Image: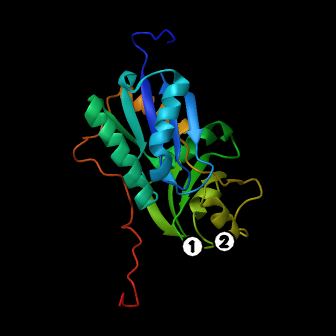
Amino acid sequence: MAYIAAMDIFILCIETSGPQCTVAIGLNGDCISEVQSSGQWQHSQYLTIYIQEVLAEANISIHQLSAVAISGGPGSYTGLRVGAASAKGICYAKEIPLISVDTLKVIAYPQVDRLDDNHKVILSTIDARRDEVYYNIYNEQLESQVQTTSHIVTTDSFSDVITEGVIICGDGADKIQEIMSSSLSNDSIILSTLPAAINMAQLSHESYQEKKYEDIAYYNPFYMKPPNITTRKKPLF
């Protein structure tokens, strides 16, 4: 086994809020192993396998984890539940902290380096069906400028943001571009992206250093909305 410094912080990062299941190991804020599903909505089928794979690739055992970080939502109700259940189970068994990272911040994180004089904020989005998105707005310090909320997109949406120059990312970006094509400036950057565990490594490490832990017994992801459950219209018999 590779030499491990006494102060090394290994964090298992789990992202199941969207259609892809991704898992990573962060070492002192850097991602050292990652696996991502090739299909969609396969979280319950592959999450445990992926956890084993990233631990093996990082050449560590589950006993060496310092914490588990979960992408905390908003997002898929079922996906978030699967991720949270696995994360809490590991934290209980190994008596290590649970860290929750805002999913919209995970989406925005890799875009910070793109900010410049013409693109001053990041509009991070999640597709919420029909013409609706979940969103937040982040500055160059990745500080949220509004409270995460849902919004039905119209041609006049986000008018105070797009006048300053904007990077729009997340899987709601294409929807915004389609509906707001006449309103967006020519230099707007549109990036249809999904949240990924690799982008949780630094964010979760910062939370670990600041001891921003969740109460494992009472933690629930930020679902934003209740599950989309339909009732059967025809009788069974």
- Please state which of residues 64 and 10 is positioned toward the viewer in this rendering: 64
Name the residue beneath numbered marker 2. 179
Q: Nearer the viewer, residue 47 or 135?
A: 47
Q: Amino acid at mark 2?
A: Ile
Q: Label 1 belongs to which residue?
A: 131
- Relative to the observer, which residue lies in front, 82 or 210? 82
Closer to the camera: disc 1 or disc 2?
A: 1
Q: Nearer the viewer, residue 142 or 28?
A: 28
Instruction: For label 1, count other residues whose C-alpha is less than 10 Å away and answer few (under 14), some (14-19) or many (20+).
Output: some
Q: Which quarter of the image is occupied by the C terminus?
A: bottom left
Whether the residues at callouts 1 and 2 have beta carbons within 8 Å, the answer is yes
Give the residue displayed 59% in from the left and 51% down from the top: 194
Residue 42: image x %, image y %?
52, 54
The residue positioned 57% from the left and 60% from the top of the image is 160
Among the 4 quarters of the image, the one containing residue 228: bottom left
Q: Secondary structure at mark 2?
A: helix
* Left/right of residue 220 with respect to residue 60 in the rendered view: left
What kind of residue is marked 1? Asp
